[in-house]
Image (cartoon, helix red, strand yellow):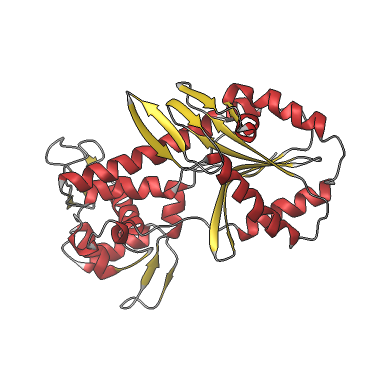
Amino acid sequence: MIKKYRTQPIIIYKLQSLLKRALLNDSKQDEIHRVLRKHISGYRGEQSLDYFYRYLHQNNLIFLHGLRILDEGYYFQIDTLIITPHFLLIIESKNIAGHLYFESQYDPMIRTLNDQQEAFENPVEQVKRQSYHLMAILNNFKIPHLTIESLVIMTNPKAITEFSSTYKEARMKVIKSSGLVAKFEELSNKLRKEIILPKDSKKISKNLIKIHTPDNPDVCSKYQINPNHLLTGVFCPSCEAEFLLRRRRTWYCASCKNNYNKAHEAALVDYALLISNTISNKSCKQFLNLTSTSQSYHLLQSLNLPFTGNRKSRIYHLDDLIKKTTSKEVASP
């Protein structure tokens, strides 16, 4: 049973909007592209595990995807938490290609790819920290005798793992995707005692979802981009780089000669992702390159957005528009 679905991280949408709207020099554009590729790769790695989750033969499993929780003043994130009657399982997925070497708990993971070496944070130590923070949170729920297990799953088929002879913990915790079912059965055979009752499972999932805080970074601030310098206007859904003209209650593309009735919705999503999740008639007029606030008023009204204030000082809330774009549920077991 899935209590919290996986959704594409909002950072992906934000970076895509930023690349579309910001005037960037080559180095900054390359940097943002690299970060975007990293997030997309990580997300696809998590998605790829859905195939293997369906083969976990045990009743009463609860899946929580993409948890982000505050503890001791810092947020910790869990790709997937599986609640079983016998134990909780933290899964950290890594979609990394190349030869991956684990020396010790004190050393980073070393990736060798195309004769170049690169150091990564040791994911074994990462899941140990996640376990520590999760246990601290769960202690507040007053459910005793919980056991937390953790795995690091290398989802990239081109990943080759190697471990030093003394780093047995990494050898036990780091597996490939295809090894998940066997490892899960191994844990289930080792931890046979039922310590988490169905009511406790529901309590744990309900409380974790309640304190989950989605990540919502300010990418303009992060990459030192002035929001006032972003490109304004409504992009053509077909030509992508072309701006549309507003005429006769529709949007017209002079390049492909097509009309689009709702093209402004995507532009407003860009505004919400990059600038603010609220917008006034005046700001809407400026961002969509309209000729009057009357036009922006009618466009915003047509979206049936929640608002505060009277007509002259009205502020529209764009959260529903963001959710419509970014909260698509992904199929899972």
Identity of the residue furthest to the front in this view: 166
Q: Is residue 137 left or right of residue 221?
A: right
Q: Nearer the viewer, residue 51 or 175?
A: 175
x%, y% of residue 114?
32, 23
x%, y% of residue 4?
62, 46
User: Image point 57% across, 40% down: which residue?
Assistant: 124
The quarter holding residue 292 reads bottom left
The quarter holding residue 211 reads bottom right
Which quarter shows the C terminus? top right
User: Image point 43% across, 49% down: which residue?
Assistant: 10
Q: Is residue 324 left or right of residue 75?
A: left
Identity of the residue furthest to the right in this view: 193
Which quarter shows the N terminus? top right
User: Image point 21% across, 52% down: which residue?
Assistant: 22
x%, y% of residue 185?
75, 26
Q: Is residue 75 visible?
A: yes
Q: Is residue 128 left or right of residue 250?
A: right
**In the rendered image of this protein, does residue 179 appear above or below residue 122?**
above
x%, y% of residue 163?
55, 28
Q: Is residue 260 visible?
A: no
Q: Is residue 223 left or right of residue 109?
A: left
Q: Nearer the viewer, residue 289 or 41?
A: 41
Q: Nearer the viewer, residue 186 or 220?
A: 186
How many marks do you count on the picture?
A: 0
